[in-house]
Image (cartoon, rainbow, N blue to C red):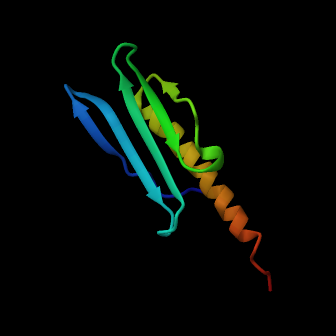
Amino acid sequence: MQFKELEWKDIISDGVTVKSDCKIKVYSYDIIIEFSIYHEKNENKYSLYSFGKGSLRRLQADIFDSIDEAKNAAYRIYNHEMLRMKNAIDSFLIEE
């Protein structure tokens, strides 16, 4: 199953994306998923921070070589969480 693409807000300085944010509200409820990617200038790496509840929240950043790798990882995390929510909702449905 594939969910909609994430919408990122990029902040670019000197041709380099220094920060990129994505915030998802699921059906206007209190389910909020947030991702932030920061460019680490000294190491030329990108740090992905994930915010939310449960397994989504990560205490340490995931490190990537490119902004695209970090965004792809964020999409995989998002997709996994959306599938978990869908499965939880499906378990309450009554089949006729």
Res 80 seen here: yes
Task: Kindly give the residue lying farthest to the bottom in the view shown.
Answer: 96
Tell me the quarter of the picture where residue 36 sits.
top left
Residue for point 46% across, 43% down: 35
Q: State the image coordinates of residue 69 (x, y, percent, origin top left).
A: 47, 31
Please determine whether, in this image, residue 29 is positioned above or below residue 84.
below
Q: State the image coordinates of residue 96 (x, y, percent, origin top left).
A: 80, 86
Q: Quadrant of the N terminus?
A: bottom right
Residue for point 69% across, 69% down: 89
Looking at the image, residue 32 sits to the left or right of residue 20; the answer is: right
Looking at the image, residue 41 sits to the left or right of residue 33; the answer is: left
Task: Kindly give the residue lying farthest to the top in the view shown.
Answer: 42
Q: State the image coordinates of residue 23 (x, y, percent, origin top left).
A: 42, 52
Count of numbered marks? 0
Res 69 seen here: no
Residue for point 65% across, 45% down: 55
